[in-house]
Amino acid sequence: MHPPHRRRLVVIGNGMAGMRTVEELLARCPAGYAITVFGDEPLVNYNRIMLSSVLAGDKSAEEIAINAHSWYEENGLTLHAGDAVLSICRKTRTVTSASGHTVPYDKLLIATGSKPLMPPLPGIELPGVVAFRQMSDVQAMLETAQTKRRAAVIGGGLLGLEAAWGLKRRGMDVAVAHLMPSLMERQLDREAAALLQRELTERGLHFFMNAQSEEILGETRAEGLLFADGRSVPADLVVVATGIRPNVALAKACGLDINRGIAVGNGMETSDPDIYAVGECVEHGGQTFGLVAPLWEQAKVCAARLAGDATASYTTPPLSTRLKITGIDVFSAGQLATQSDDDSELVLRDSGRGVYRKLILREGRLVGAVMYGDVAESGWYFELIRNHSDISPFRDRILLGRALSHACAHDKDMETDVADLSDDTQICGCNGISKGAIAAAIKSKQLTTLNEVRAHTKASASCGQCTSAVQAILAHVTGAAAPLPETMCGCTDLSHDAVRKEILTQKLKTQEMVFSALAWRSADGCAKCRPALNYYLLCAWPGEYVDDSRSRFVNERLHANIQKDGTYSVIPRMWGGLTNPAELRAIAAAAEKHGVPAVKVTGGQRIDLLGVPKERLPAIWADLNAAGLVSGHAYGKSLRTVKTCVGSEWCRFGTQDSTGLGVKLEKMTWGSWTPHKFKMAVSGCPRNCAEASIKDFGIVCVEGGYDIMVGGNGGIEVRVTDQLTRAVSEEEVMEFCAAFLQLYREEARYLERTAPWVERMGIAYVKKRLVDDAAGRKALAGRFAHAQRYSQDDPWFERAGRGADAHEFKSLAVVE
Amino acid sequence: MSAWIEIGKLDDIPIRGSRIVETPAGQLALFRTSDDGVFALVNRCPHRGGPLSEGLVSGKVVVCPLHGWTIDLESGSATAPDEGCTPRMTVRVENGRLWLPSGGTFPHDP
């Protein structure tokens, strides 16, 4: 079989816009295109914005690389770095490079960026004159800075000032020549610019304002700069930072429509529908681009179009500017000044602290902000500008920032807290979803329930910690309170608790019986309900229900933890955290024999062998089994570990044999399936070295007894255990442990840890069932013991020693 | 399509399960649904490249084990709201035996 025919995408330009487009495309459709990238710089792509940080010595060249060579390889990209494309032939649909490569394309992406604008000054071609655009420019500047002392920068804009500051940091005397009377006049008003100039002057930069450069002086290399008014400044290095112009040469030569940049439509397509263009080389709606935010947006739209989404459409987002000079905080967005008498200007000036803040208001909305010195509120102002928010309720306080603007408005509840968050605020840490993304999805897709929001945004769909915040956003956006998710999944209208009740009362003993008796909407359930039903049936009918491996997540089906690269981790059980030289030798030998790339001590007092390919799992398990090691169930919604301290056997503070008790507890409970993972610990004294107070079931030994603690969690949301009772003997501890586990197994919902379950039921309920009701406790412990008769077979031995599920570990066929 | 290669039996794939076929172009995942439909997809989730063969199969979808994307077995497309596609391949089932096209390409590549 030959490799699949894939459409060919050729990308001209290995810069930020081009590669972001490729990244977005790979994320959407990893196998959709065979991609070839040409870049004229002999480097992998790097973050051009950070060149000034390299110049200033804040970052190294390596640190600003975006994608390493390995990234290109891993994603199957063909990279021709240092090989400029010379021509595009639209007739044959090929591009030809300087080194003679001719590469055909089905789709072509032009991302050739921009070139520095070099004014036609006499002497501009002299050695010692550089632009500030590429890594090679920075290298030339750094080389000069080692041997020469004086530099002049033409251009007092963002880039020119960053270049000047970088050279100053490298020890040069730096003069800045600016054509206008005020620095960064496109981003700053006069007042902020004056503050900036004052501060930079104090830091040692020299300024020539209203300075029209006329000639670069020098015979064999740059020696100085002459201005039209007769002033001059000596300089061994002249940096030209007067602006950029789109690099359109290739596009022009092949006949594409060009204005100032390559003309593109809303889908980033050029006048040839098979050729796209993004970044600083394009012109969209009469506008060209030099800031990064619109580039990202263009990349997203272009990738969507390449992936076949014809609806993706580009509009330029509102822009803001910040200067990257350490210790100088400047921000601007939107209008810099009032445009008519209807506009208002609000100004806060603290000359002592060097703080300046100006806001431009129009019809009750914020349309511009200029800030100097303290820019902490810039995110909020920018958000108000982008959202066209009505600011009239707090107009009198808006200059003071967000907190004070809202302080007097009304009593805060969760909803207004959410309203105060900026759109960039990350709500869901697991999936990186911002408030803005959630709100946008709710609005555009008219979502009304938490489950819908989860499905569309993934927010709160992983760990669930942000659920209340997501619900608050839903309530805030829709203006209605959102009900908690009630149903088990889309296959039924019944809740988890209702389904469990029916399983028992109707004696439903297979998934098929559940589907038919409870009128499931889908013939074989879904990825949400099947694992839950499998657990509920296993718990309800131990020894009768046959575990359905196809209803288990991969980790529980393969008895190993899948890792991000598709390999697995193997963790043998170490009873109570105890091991011995023979076990350690066996683990070491297995790790060496199977080429395990990483060995890690876990938080649960065991050893993790990481990076084992699936087909090797049975072999490594067999070797571990031979030394008496069994599965640690580190992958399951099951009993995980029992962590212990050394206790009275060794420790001078120990009050009981915590290690021995831990081993007994683990021997009793291992192999048990539970609604979610279940961890235990036994500490030998109240110093609690085994951290029992953040475990699902923890024992803290005291003189003459054992404090039993339940419902702790050290994970995302730390919860300290509640005390259940104090037991007087190990036997009593064992009974409480079995009973608590069984109560949790029977009553908690699938994927509910003990911490939220105890909170939901209340510790008083748990005490009532386990402490007050001795007969009930014994019955629970009895049911646990019964279930354990069917669960304590080592799953590794089943597979490695008895050949169970052999098909799971080898491929069906190999086709040459 | 000129030639077909026999790669195994229908019963080699567990119901609501998957098996892998190694090809020079990478791994293919063959899925068997509860109604004995067989589907072949490139074994890479369009999201982060997760092994779809290890996902849960129900109806005519598989859920990627890494981050829960739901991929339609018939089209290879991610189910809304996710967006992306995994290339798929024709697989022929005759008399309980499975056949893949040989010497050819992925006919349904997007």
Image (cartoon, grey):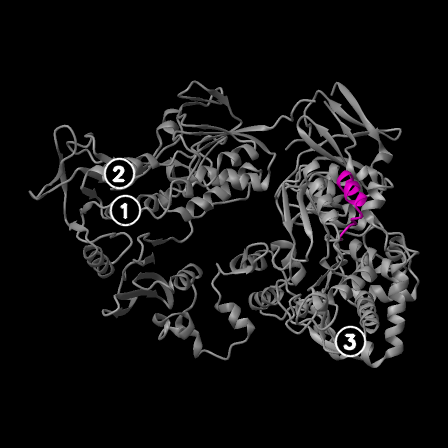
Q: Secondary structure at mark 3?
A: helix
For image coordinates 71% across by 33% down, the residue present is B28
Pointer 2: what residue? A141
Q: Which residues are magenta?
A: A618-632
For image coordinates 87% across by 70% down, the residue present is A780
Callout 3 and callout 2 share a chain? yes
Q: Marks 3 and 2, Cα distance to the nearest angstrom? A: 71 Å
| Labels 2 and 1 touching (C-beta < 8 A) | yes
Q: Tell me where residue A362 appears, x and y as whole percent.
A: 34, 65
Q: Tell me where residue B88 appears, x and y as whole percent.
A: 70, 34
- Left or right: where does residue B76 sit relative to residue A313? right
For image coordinates 70% across by 75% down, the residue present is A722
- Name the subunit of mark 1: A
Query: Looking at the picture, which amino acid does disc 1 mark?
Result: Gly
Point out the image quarter for the C terminus of chain A.
top right
For image coordinates 21% across by 34% down, the residue present is A129
Q: Nearer the viewer, residue A587 or A719?
A: A587
Pointer 3: what residue? A766
Say whether residue A697 is magenta: no
Say if residue A393 shows up in the picture. Answer: no
Given the current orientation, which residue lies at the most extreme bottom position?
A772
- Name the subunit of mark 3: A
Pointer 1: what residue? A166
Callout 1 and callout 3 share a chain? yes
Q: Main secondary structure of the magenta part?
A: helix
Binning the other alpha carbons within 10 Å of mark 3 as few (below 14), some (14 to 19) or many (20 upward) gives some
Q: Tell me where residue A408 appears, x and y as whole percent.
A: 43, 79
Q: Quadrant of residue A237?
A: top left
Point out the image quarter for the N terminus of chain A.
top right
Query: Looking at the picture, which amino acid does disc 3 mark?
Result: Val
Query: Looking at the picture, which amino acid does disc 2 mark?
Result: Met
